[in-house]
Amino acid sequence: MESEWDPLDEPLSPPRFSSVFERDRHVAYMEMMYQLLPSPYETQEVNRLTLAYFVISGLHLLSVLDRVDKEAVASWVLSLQAHPTNRAELNDGKFYGFHGSRTSQFPPDNNGVLGHNNSHLASTYCALAILKIVGYDFSTIDSKTILTSMRNLQQPDGSFMPIRTGAETDLRFVYCAAAICFMLEDWRGMDKEKAKEYIINCQSYDGGFGLIPGSESHAVVTALTTHSGATYCAVASLRLMGVIGDDILSTSVAPSIIDVPLLLDWILQRQATDGGFQGRPNKDSDTCYAFWIGAVLHMLGCYKLIDEKALRRFLLTCQSEYGGFSKFSGSVFPGQVPDLYHSYYGLTAFSLLGESGMNPLCFELGIADLAATGLLI
């Protein structure tokens, strides 16, 4: 007797992916995030300012910043800044930057003293980036307070703590400090020479950069590895500080303070056979590395050395039908859903690829070039 047909016995058909960049869907996804963050992001409440950075900057890259209430956004961001009660407090060891959210922003005591100041370097970078994007007048920002107190976070070896109560010190926060100084157009917030030496000491034997001296090269921002995120932070910081320029590969200029040929060899090896980029050897390709690696290659003037068509094909397999991007390719890991972090860096990756209808990216700051130069559109 013949067995009954069971649809579950049928082999699964391979997933189908769009062959084009679904701009309208990405706009809808980012607009949804602007209006209301889904419940899974509750655990990221303390990083609300960073999430806002991904949304506002993402909408700007998509050329739809008109969907944002710029004045309301600027007012909210400014409300998260920590302020000293007097100038003497600038030398009390605390950092008067921006809090990551209301959750970490405790009110002053009855005497007006801010006993629990949890402002953070990364939150301050995100705050200033958002203010740049919405066209806020930086001449009204008390940059002296931010920069003077930021020096309290720099360590004797040139690295930075992210918060005055202490934490890990590594290239991520050197980059945040450099970006803050660059955006405020004032380098009093750091000892550039010490920071430069720290960055140089983070270059690994294989050419990439680790988060701390002696660690493995890496392309993502995780601890104790050489990865693309650490490598991005190193190269972008040196660019922002004016230590390396556009002619870094020119044979007519003096040798660079970093080993550029070795760095280029390491970073070009990060493009995998599927066209995507991996953070370090033997790891899966991941959407965000298309930015961490791609931006470094642009800063080195070597982006054309990669297989751009293959990278684009990989990114399209990470593109969600609902808008946004997932971490991994849906062809390798079916059932992937988009998240805000990878969606933002997916957008930056397409900007680096020169996607039509997108604003070009400032490689060093990770925001649209128009915002970085103060020309808001």
Image (tube, rainbow, N blue to C red):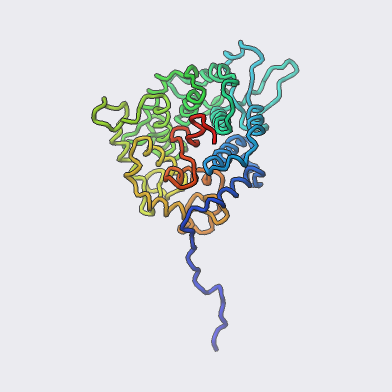
Q: Residue at x 66, y 29 (%)?
A: 75
Image quarter where the N terminus lies is: bottom right
Q: Residue furthest top?
A: 88
x and y, in percent, of residue 20 in the image: 47, 55
Seen in the picture, residue 143 relative to 170 is either above or below; the reply is above
Q: Residue at x 39, y 37 (%)?
A: 296
x and y, in percent, of residue 177 in the image: 49, 25
- In the image, 242 versus 206, the foreground residue is 242
x and y, in percent, of residue 363 in the image: 43, 35
In the shown orientation, is residue 308 left or right of residue 45?
A: left
- In the image, 63 versus 153, the foreground residue is 63
In the shown orientation, is residue 275 left or right of residue 113?
A: left
x and y, in percent, of residue 26 in the image: 55, 49
- In the image, 317 versus 66, the foreground residue is 66
- In the image, 26 versus 357, the foreground residue is 357
Q: Residue furthest bottom?
A: 1
Image quarter where the C terminus lies is: top right
Q: Residue furthest right?
A: 110
Q: Splitting the image into 4 quarters, where does residue 80 fall?
A: top right
Report how many numbered discs are placed on residues in the image.
0
Seen in the picture, residue 84 relative to 72 is either above or below; the reply is above
